[in-house]
Image: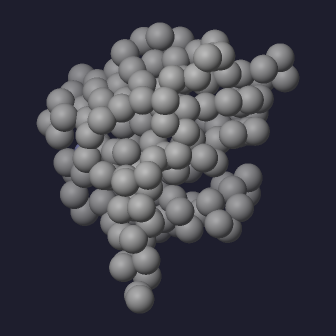
Amino acid sequence: MNLKELYQEIILEHGKNPRNLGKPNNFNKDAKGNNPLCGDNVHIYLKLNNLRKVEDISFEGSGCAISMASASIMTELMKGKSDNEVREIIEDFLGMIKENPELKSKILEEDDKTKLMCLSGVKQYPMRVKCATLSWHTLVSAIDNNGKEISTEN
Ligand code: ZN
């Protein structure tokens, strides 16, 4: 299995069995995101505790395998991070998806970097970039403008 096949395998697996799927009982920030070009929808829920750490994060949504896998991988690695760390990881991920050859953040474990690099294959496809980044922009909205709905098309 080469690297590209491994990456596809991980995306398909997360797409089929998304982690942290569902609406939690306890959350204090959330936002919805919508990618009308592909029909992807996500609703991100998170609980930031008094220390501004992500105590819990989950999502509801529907859409293509890339959008669901991206949300699944994102929620998995944000747990336990502070809001500043979350922002740094988001910036790093969006930079990598747009232009950077690799992830730079020192907060991320090698394992997490490998999972995120699975999504790097979308780089050449602007339509797919929107699928991969939808949940990430929605998370920014949840943290910064609690409740504000975002769309990839405005
Ligand atoms: Zn999509």
On the image, the x and y values in percent for residue 80 come to: 76, 39
- In the visual, does 34 lie left or right of 11? left
Q: Tell me if residue 32 comes above or below residue 114 in the rendering.
A: above
The residue located at (73%, 52%) in the rendering is 107
On the image, the x and y values in percent for residue 112 come to: 62, 60
Where is the N terminus found, in terms of image quarters? bottom left
The residue located at (25%, 62%) in the rendering is 124
Q: Quadrant of residue 83?
A: top right
Quadrant hosting ligand 1: top left
- In the visual, does 11 lie left or right of 81? left
The residue located at (42%, 12%) in the rendering is 148
On the image, the x and y values in percent for residue 32 come to: 39, 20
Residue farthest bottom in this picture: 1
Can the viewer see residue 124 in this picture? yes
The residue located at (36%, 70%) in the rendering is 8
21 or 41: nearer the viewer: 21
Q: Quadrant of residue 13?
A: bottom left
Q: Tell me if residue 28 comes above or below residue 74 in the rendering.
A: above
Numbered marks: total: 0
On the image, the x and y values in percent for residue 95 come to: 47, 51
- In the visual, does 87 lie left or right of 59? right
Can the viewer see residue 97 in this picture? no
How are the colours assigned in the image?
one colour
Residue farthest right in this picture: 51
Where is the C terminus found, in terms of image quarters? top left
